[in-house]
Image (cartoon, grey):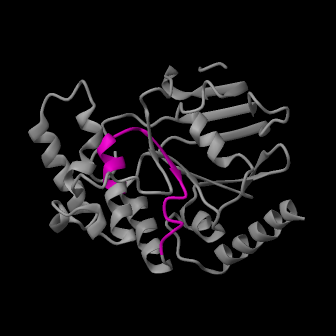
Amino acid sequence: MSVSTSSAIANSAQAIAIELREAHLSYLDSQVATLSGLNMFVPAGQWTCLLGRSGCGKTTLLRYLAGLLNDKVEWGGHLTLTHGCSLQGQVAYMAQQDLLLPWLNVLDNVLLSRKFDENEHDPVASQHQAERLLESVGLADYQQAMPAQLSGGMRQRVALARTLMQDKPVVLMDEPFSALDAVTRYKLQNLSASLLQDKTVILITHDPQEAVRLADQLYLLQGRPAHAQRLSVPDAPPPRTIDAQCAELQQAILTQLEQDYE
């Protein structure tokens, strides 16, 4: 492998672009590759959305980029990053489940990453930052609430604030809104687009409409093993209102994805 001010609240880290060329990935206990011939470009400071059938390797790719699978998979090809850096220590991961610790209140859940940061020297400043983030996601009055007291949408807003608190240049999102009702999902899409502005975001989703609304770059993972196909996105900047152009692309995605289920 060769490695050649953030959101509206905080972005101290410089945005990173990621390029994958002729990459392949397979689990060590499998004879069949999960991903093969993968070519993708993830621009710095933009949203790249990935769609594909269940089991095609979307989450595997994200977990590899997050450094969670290094001893479980075989990787080949080229992973190139801007600024001559590595992804180690540069990634925040937001999962489908909010993963809030039930014994910590909302504020302490947002502060969790700082509790384990050996470079944390100003806990008072960190608390003030967490409080500002909770205000930005509309939860200023819920700092002392426990996760069990929150709705699903509120819990995901806490998870978003916790992700922002990490202040990483790359944010990997694995279907973070999939369990929410349509209106809450729509609102969180808009909120995330605003607060993660200038971050390099890779979003996995099974919802073509969500991808069409949020993507600066849009890829379909298809085939067995899966490869990436890039699709053109509508002219309007994200988050988009679903107009005729968006609806046409959404239908084209569904038609193309249907081929993998035949």
In this image, 119 relative to 211: left or right? left
Q: Nearer the viewer, residue 251 or 31?
A: 31
State whether residue 88 is above or below residue 249.
Answer: above
Residue 184 horizontal/vertical position (percent):
42, 75
Q: Where is the C terminus found, in terms of image quarters?
A: bottom right
Farthest-out residue, front = 103
The residue shown at (38%, 62%) is 156
Q: Nearer the viewer, residue 72 or 243?
A: 72
Q: Quadrant of residue 259?
A: bottom right
Q: Where is the N terminus found, in terms of image quarters?
A: top right
State whether residue 79 is above or below residue 244.
Answer: above
The residue shown at (23%, 59%) is 134
Q: Is residue 244 magenta?
A: no
Farthest-out residue, left = 124
Counting the numbered discs, the total is 0
Residue 125 horizontal/vertical position (percent):
12, 40
| Residue 52 seen in the figure | yes
Q: Quadrant of residue 4?
A: top right
State whether residue 134 is above or below residue 20.
Answer: below
| Residue 5 seen in the figure | no
Image: magenta residue range: 160-180
Residue 5 horizontal/vertical position (percent):
29, 42
Residue 163 horizontal/vertical position (percent):
36, 48
State whether residue 9 is above or below residue 82.
Answer: below
In this image, 103 relative to 204: left or right? left
The residue shown at (36%, 55%) is 159
The residue shown at (83%, 43%) is 225
